Image (cartoon, rainbow, N blue to C red):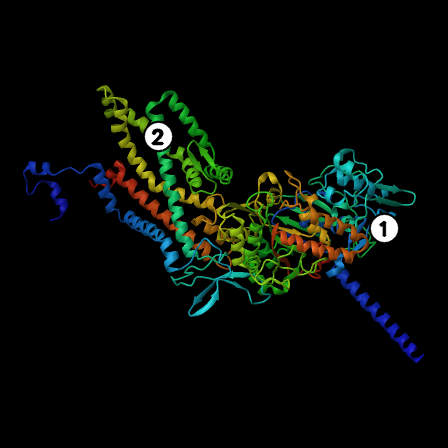
Amino acid sequence: MAASETSIGPVNPEPVGAVQRRPAAGPWVTAFRKLVRDKAAMAALLVFVLIVIGCSFAPYYASNVAHTFPFSSNLNGKVVINGEEQPVIEESTEGLGLGTTPIGPTWDIHGYFLGADDQGRDVLARMLYGGLNSLWIASASTIICLLFAAVLGVTAGFFGGMIDAVLSRILDVIWAFPIFLLAISLSIVLINSSIEIGPIVIRAGSLWLPIFIIGIVYVPYIARPIRGQVLSLKNSEFVLAAVGLGVPSHRILWKDILPNVATTLIVFVPLMMALNMVTESALSFLSIGVQPPDASWGTIIQDGQNLLYSRPMVALAPGLAIAVTVMTLNVFGDGVRDALDPRSKLRIGGD
Amino acid sequence: MKKSHWLGISAGALCMAAAIFTGTSSADAQDHRGGTMRLVAVGAGGTIDPQVNYTLQYWQLYQGLYDGLLNFKKGTGAEGFKVVPDIAEDMPQVADDGKTLIFKIRKGIKFSNGQELTTKDVVASFQRIFKVSSPTAGGFYSGIVGADKCLADAASCTLEGGVVADEAANTVTIHLTQPDAEIYYKLAVPHAVILPADSPTKDVGTAPLPGTGAYTIESYDPNKQLKIVRNPHFKEWSKDAQPDGYPDVVVMDFGLTDEAEVTAVANDQADWAFDPPPADRLAEIGTKYKDQVHVTPLTAMWYAPMNVNIPPFNNEKARQAVSYAIDRNAAVKLFGGKVLAQPVCQILPPGFPGNEPYCPFTKNPGGGKYNGPDMEMAKKLMEESGQKGQPVTVISEDSAVSKAVGTYLQSVLNELGFKAELKPISSNIQFTYIQNTNNKVQISVTQWYQDYPAASDFLNILFGCDSFHEGSDSSINIAGICDKEIDGKMKAALKLAVTDEAGANKMWAEIDKAMTDKAAAAILFTPKHVDFVSKRLGNFQFNPQYYFMVYQAWVQ
């Protein structure tokens, strides 16, 4: 008998108490189950986890597999391919003999799998190290961004009045700037100088500079919706009831507001990571993000820009890595949003 | 007699043949006359004022636009370094032990606005060099009597007693405070061109000034295009100094990337690209378009000046360690390979006056040849210097090659034990940035291309005490070195050159060695120049002073 027919009525009536004893799944568990059932989101997560694991192996790969140090120039280096020694940077011998060309992909995991860049460095080894930096910057800046946004949005929305007015105007000012223009301007000003905010010192060239810059520029984009949500929650029945019962403000904030805001913040995590990764790549491509000899996928694309005709793989590989990673984060982010959004529950018609 | 008769016939036949040949050649030349030559560049070269602009891009184009009293001969090879009379009828009459130069001014030369050139224009043009604060006013022309007052107060510059006109005799006399062996070169560069006396006494920016050359600027928009057309008032007076040109119109379009420039020339959409072809297109143009490529050695150098006044390079051993550690062959690879550059250790380029091959910073030194880096010696010197662990910032341009050399340098410095970082900054400001001591630049990557063929242009200009000005953007002695003993020898060599050029060059060779030993700069390589031209461009000629002679090439 088809399951749908059971909906007509209880064919095999069970004691009502038995159904009632079945524990109701909480919202987090329900969301998690929904997320796990979302095949696209799970596939995206799997790919993302593989990327993270792959990048984590960068130091091991460089020193134990490829036997290379990808932060040093290796212009006069040699590599053995099919038992034959070849220069990593080859001088042209045809025609007028102009120009030099780095070795192309050897497709041999033991060295120069994706070829060399113009400094004779192993592109795959740099890709893995670069991925670590890109992922680290994207993650850390997302945390900073969400932290600032949550504090500002909740404070502005919950306390209202003058506090809301001041904070909202500050956010408006930041929002008024085109995001990339602001990020580029901040990077140009700060990248060559240290920042000292009380005990916090960020040195020139540190990875914390792009983390800090990217984290800050996106704050209004998160803080605004958070503020709106808090304003709405403040007027919801359960909060009004709590106020009516004389529950202290900090308890309302902690118990009633924040748990509701948390789902929104969680939805933002993968989406902001994707966005921050793209921003970091753009800044690094413009030489105002990760500083050499450190690598990120953005800096490797920039390195490859000068080799687009002769060795396109140098720019293509990190470009693809960014595209795939951003795609996985976006697909996973959509899955998380669907899982946590109560309205989508109705649409899907599941739990 | 028989012999002479035969000789007579032969001579006659030769004359006839020559006449026929010349006639044919002249007819050919007429056939090639006309058309529009299309040039492309990544960007404009800044102000169009010939007495202010100091870029190869426009110095190259000024050759058909303006004339000085003297000029470099429009020839190829060593001939191109010869100075010939231009606005002056002849080379100057020299008096007072070389301190007085009398120039007879040609008659009948007209500016492109139709005005006839007079001695007044010559005097006003020399005053204008100071009034517009020409970048070489102090360096090249400070030896003219009255120049000190002009340098102190440019607005009221008269060069009284320094540049004197005699309208009746149609002469201009230049008085120098002391003899200057290089004054002819200095009078032949574009900063000393003759302009109408009523020219504005400030940098004209984008408003072209009338000149006396075969061509004149019709319009200039630095964001778009520079258009040059024939000067309607030009009549050729000296083929050596200012020959007539072939194309009727020359346009230089701005705004293409260097990749796009190569593509445009390859597709015959442009005739010549000003900027060097990008590294990843070199192999392609060197094979597929090899008949359209011209590679020419330059008297220039790529080098890494090290600031001798601040740590860690105020330590001579640290500087020498860097010089020993750098693999110049690696730097050559970054420039495009050994066909395009030659590794060197010394300041004077190969073949330059005063050059005697010398290379102390290499494995097995001796013989003047570069034999690769000596890392062992470098590390030993580094230990002795006590500078290990010191932070160093390398300042390079943001152009592909400069940045690549900077990255390599950073790698070498880290290998030596420094904590090096690289800051590539815009090519538009890098050269002035690294000169200013306020920026505390420790080491940088830069280039020097000769202004004129004299050893002093490298040694005295780049490493002389007089070229070091603290806190100024115009302190071309980037390393900030001022060795009184060597500086004294340079002054003596400059003095000797007035009477004994060979003796002076011998002295310059010694000075070159002494300054190279000081390692105030790590000299990397001598570059070659690559010109990539369209299929239709003919009669390509390369002048060692001003490079591709644009107006002497034809496009039809």
State the SS at label 1: loop
Q: Residue at x 7, y 43 (%)?
A: A11
Which residue is the extreme one toward the bottom? B2
Q: Position of residue A44 (x, y in %)?
A: 31, 49
Give the image quarter of residue A35: top left
Tell me the crowding category of disc 1: few under 14, some 14 to 19, or many 20 or more residues within 10 angstroms, Cα based: many
Front position in the image: B173 or B383: B383
Dot 2 and dot 1 residues touching (CB under 8 Å): no
The chain identifier of the residue carrying mark 2 reads A
Spatial CA distance of label 2 from label 1 is 81 Å
Q: Residues within 10 Å of mark 2 (few under 14, many from 20)?
A: few
What residue did someone put label 2 on?
A: A151
Q: Amino acid at mark 2?
A: Val
Residue drawn at point x = 45 percent, y = 37 percent:
A179
Q: Position of residue B284 (x, y in %)?
A: 56, 62
Q: Up-down: is A24 above or below B451? A: above
Q: What number is the disc on residue B92? A: 1
Residue B9 position in % (x across, y down): 89, 75
x and y, in percent, of residue A319 in the image: 43, 51
Q: Quadrant of the C terminus of chain A?
A: top left
Of A155 and B34, which appears nearest the observer? A155
Residue B200 visible in the snapshot: no
Q: Type of residue at label 1?
A: Pro
**Does residue A49 appear left or right of residue A83 in this picture?**
left
In the displayed structure image, the side of residue A52 where residue B44 appears, left or right: right
Residue farthest to the front? Answer: B384
How many marks can you see? Answer: 2
The chain carrying label 1 is: B
